[in-house]
Amino acid sequence: MLKRQLGPCVTYFPQPTSIITSVNSEGTANLMTASWVGIVSKTPPTMAISLNKGRQTYDNISKQKEFVVNMVPASLAVEADFCGIRSGKNHDKLEQAGLSLQPAECVKVPLLNESPLNVECRLVQEVELGDYRLLMGEILQIHAAESAFDEAGKMDVRCFDPLVYLGGVREYWDLGNMRAAAYADGQRLVVDK
Amino acid sequence: MLKRQLGPCVTYFPQPTSIITSVNSEGTANLMTASWVGIVSKTPPTMAISLNKGRQTYDNISKQKEFVVNMVPASLAVEADFCGIRSGKNHDKLEQAGLSLQPAECVKVPLLNESPLNVECRLVQEVELGDYRLLMGEILQIHAAESAFDEAGKMDVRCFDPLVYLGGVREYWDLGNMRAAAYADGQRLVVDK
């Protein structure tokens, strides 16, 4: 395939759109939109987020050792973009974006109420990467929208309606159609010798 | 919002679907599908991947200190699932999946020819997380499908057709519609005081 070289940059996608919640020493919550978020281990369940060391969220997590990763639904694309643009140092993003909080179970940091998937984390490790800090959190509890479950306990992706971020292209997209079942459809190509 | 508690697990999405290419000491290439992949720093551009320490890909990267992250297009959903199921230790995944390689520019590891977005990385740091290893690679070069660019140099997301993985739900989906422009549409909510 004919390709064009972009040089060393940070163009890679698709990525999740996530709002990180954190609190300062007075318990005041801050929201920050992040796309550099992912699962990094199953033993124990661990999530990593990367953020600029100048962010209020970094200051909050360094001191309180806790954070929550909230999946953003496509219906909140504009609100999520707003929470990525403005610093929490001078603005009450919660009020301006019309968002609300609900209590977590294991941490003092609140969940984003409007998010259908929230991950409670306790900071366990930090890696310095230039101006960025990769923060690893042990996953303590995950909350998923009750309305997404059928009677057998299977989750319907459409109810979560996840917002996908295209880094480098700077666009937010929603999901289209299911293309394959994981750990299942690939079996078709297996030819044991 | 009413929510159900899942306990500490690794259910989080959306995630990118990526095929990691690596080579062993004889230069033989291996493919491994991974969803725990992401950008982690801009200074310098850095990508992180997480994989089980028992994988052939981990052995290859530990020794050769290089890897390539290849974005999977939706048209290769079944092939990507196959490359996640089978270990490279006993199978020639390239041949069985009908995929091909092309030379990289800065590393000995080849690019996946059929992938419209390839990221060449040099291993710079490793973090132990239980049975998993988080490998950080400095981004040396990125290749993007020439057909995705218009005359002004803007990339069309539809030409990449990225495959989105839903971890926990175990489904692969394609993209639907654009919902917002990043660093732009959120400005509408800004109210300076």
Image (cartoon, coloured by chain):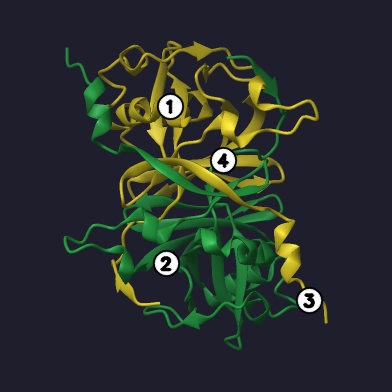
Chain colours: A green, B yellow
User: Label 3: how many residues lie within 10 Å, few (<14), some (14-19) or many (20+)?
Assistant: few
Of the two numbered discs 4 and 3 in the rendering, the one whose residue sits closer to the viewer: 3
Which residue is label 1 attached to?
B75
Q: Respond whether the residues carrying marks 4 and 2 are from the same subunit.
A: yes
Can the viewer see residue B36 in this picture?
no
Left or right side of A102 for A145: left
What chain letter is assigned to the residue under label 3?
B
Residue type (three-letter) at the residue carrying disc 3: Val
Which residue is label 2 attached to?
A116
> How many angstroms separate mark 1 from mark 2 (CA)?
29 Å
Which one is earlier in the sequence, the residue at label 3 or at label 1?
A: 1
Which one is earlier in the sequence, the residue at label 4 or at label 2?
A: 4
Q: Respond whether the residues carrying marks 4 and 3 are from the same subunit.
A: no
Q: Above or below — where is B128 with respect to B32?
A: below
Query: Which numbered tag is attached to residue A13?
Result: 4
User: Label 2: how many residues lie within 10 Å, few (<14), some (14-19) or many (20+)?
Assistant: many
Residue type (three-letter) at the residue carrying disc 1: Ser
Of the two numbered discs 1 and 4 in the rendering, the one whose residue sits closer to the viewer: 1
Where residue B58 appears, as percent x and y from the top left, is 40, 32
Q: Residue at x 58, y 40 (%)?
A: B47
**The residue tagged with tag 4: helix, strand or loop?**
loop
Residue type (three-letter) at the residue carrying disc 2: Pro
**The residue tagged with tag 3: helix, strand or loop?**
loop
Quadrant of the rendered image containing residue B171:
top left
Which residue is label 3 attached to?
B191
Q: Respond whether the residues carrying marks 3 and 1 are from the same subunit.
A: yes
Where residue B24 appears, as percent x and y from the top left, is 42, 18
Q: Above or below — where is A37 with respect to B112?
A: below
Left or right side of B107 for B132: left
User: Label 4: how many residues lie within 10 Å, few (<14), some (14-19) or many (20+)?
Assistant: many
**The residue tagged with tag 1: helix, strand or loop?**
helix
